[in-house]
Image (spheres, rainbow, N blue to C red):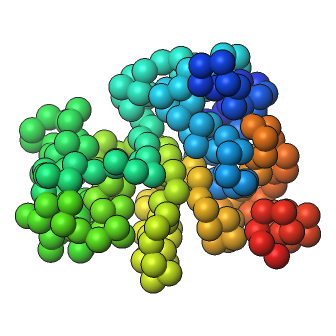
Amino acid sequence: MPLLKAEGVTAGYGDTEILRDVHLEVGEGEIVSLIGPNGAGKSTLMKTVFGLVHPRQGSIRFRDTEIAGRSPYDIVKEGMCYVPQVANVFVQLTVEENLEMGGYLLEERELAGRKEQVYELFPKLRERRRQRAGKMSGGERQMVAIGSALMLEPALLLLDEPSAGLSPKLVDEIFENIRRINATGLAVLMVEQNARKSLEMAERGYVLAGGQNRVEGSGAELLNDPDVARLYLGG
């Protein structure tokens, strides 16, 4: 069984239907990339998987448990965490306080060990642990947001546009961080504006357009597909 399997998902906001009969799978330890034009429904699919949007139809199974329509709080306890594109840190809190907020389900005795593991992944956060997140650069904030999500040792991490608004150097740093996180065995489902770069590191990818599945395949297959390159990769 895949770690995550969504089938026939239809969802939207109010009377507006955004997703129509969408399917998606993520295997244990995989990186899976969602690409497509603006307005394709990528972020809506992420939010639906995480329980922020309730599907009107379809099934979403995580670790073979049906989670469609369940609350984000319940889904986090099942082993999934989500890093949104914006408002993903507490700007008035320090790095360490943000990590502690991310570990809100942990017992006090577990917090120190989990923070240490995050600091080993992100040494820069250890150096800045007393600094307020609101005083940090965009790339550093992303590290804080991802580190906070890792506090609960999820099996699947959802990342929505992790490189948005960052300089090319910081984009490379964020993608290297994602590789290192994935190397620990953590599966990653990622929506990313830098489609080419995300497919280069993904085992598999899905192209969404108009709220529907258009193309799917391995990262290499999508990179080498001339129609995908022309329509979605800018080349």
Front one among 176 and 111: 176
Front one among 91 and 101: 91
Quarter of the rendering occupied by the N terminus = top right
Residue at (14, 34) in percent of width and height = 107
What x and y, as percent, mark residue 59?
67, 21
Q: Is residue 196 left or right of residue 88?
A: right
Q: Quadrant of residue 119?
A: bottom left
Question: Can residue 226 be seen?
Answer: yes
Residue at (14, 61) in percent of width and height = 132
Q: Quadrant of residue 223?
A: bottom right
Judged from this view, the residue extending furthest toward the right is: 226
Question: Can residue 62 be seen?
Answer: no
Q: Is residue 170 above or below residue 55?
A: below
Q: Is residue 142 left or right of residue 105?
A: right
Residue at (59, 59) in percent of width and height = 192
What x and y, as percent, mark residue 181?
43, 62
Q: Quadrant of residue 48?
A: top right
Q: Is residue 54 above or below residue 81?
A: above
Judged from this view, the residue extending furthest toward the bottom is: 169
What x and y, as percent, mark residue 141?
30, 62
Q: How many marks?
A: 0
What x and y, as percent, mark residue 109?
9, 41
Residue at (78, 41) in percent of width and height = 210
Judged from this view, the residue extending furthest toward the front is: 15
Quarter of the rendering occupied by the C terminus = bottom right
